[in-house]
Image: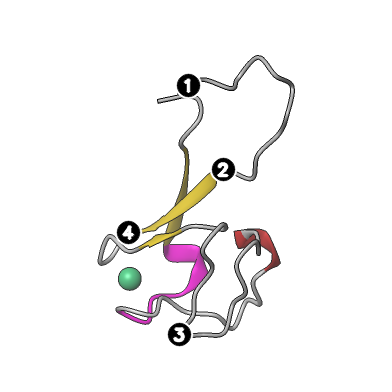
Amino acid sequence: MLNRENTGYIMPKDWWRCSVCGYVYKPEIGDAVSKIHSGTLFEEIPNTWVCPVCFAEKKMFFKFNTSKKR
Ligand SMILES: [Zn+2]
């Protein structure tokens, strides 16, 4: 696994996890079900968007960062 933390290149690596069903929204993939294009940040998704698996609202999602841990 490569470690690119020191390159200064910022990747949109914030993934969001549904607290209800565990579905993970990945910006690099998007959500084909709701026609969310790949590369779309979670913050850019319309508030009307819901979890494609269990239909939970956006506020039910928690962000977790895959590149660094607090
Ligand atoms: Zn869900």
Where residue 37 appears, as percent x and y from the top left, is 62, 74
How far is the residue under mark 2 from the one under mark 4?
A: 19 Å
**Between disc 1 and disc 4, whose residue precedes?**
4
Check disc 4 and report the residue beneath it.
19
In the rendered structure, the answer to whether residue 21 lies left or right of residue 37 reads left
Where residue 6 appears, as percent x and y from the top left, is 65, 14
**Between disc 1 and disc 3, whose residue precedes?**
3
Using the image, tell me which numbered label, if any, was put on residue 33.
3
Q: Quadrant location of ligand 1?
A: bottom left
Check disc 1 and report the residue beneath it.
70
**Between disc 3 and disc 2, whose residue precedes?**
2
How far is the residue under mark 3 from the one under mark 4?
A: 19 Å
Check disc 2 and report the residue beneath it.
13
Name the amino acid, label 3. Answer: Val
Callout 2 touching callout 4 (CB < 8 Å): no
**Above or below for 13 versus 17:** above
How far is the residue under mark 2 from the one under mark 1?
A: 15 Å
Identify which residue, 40 or 2, lies in the foreground. Answer: 2
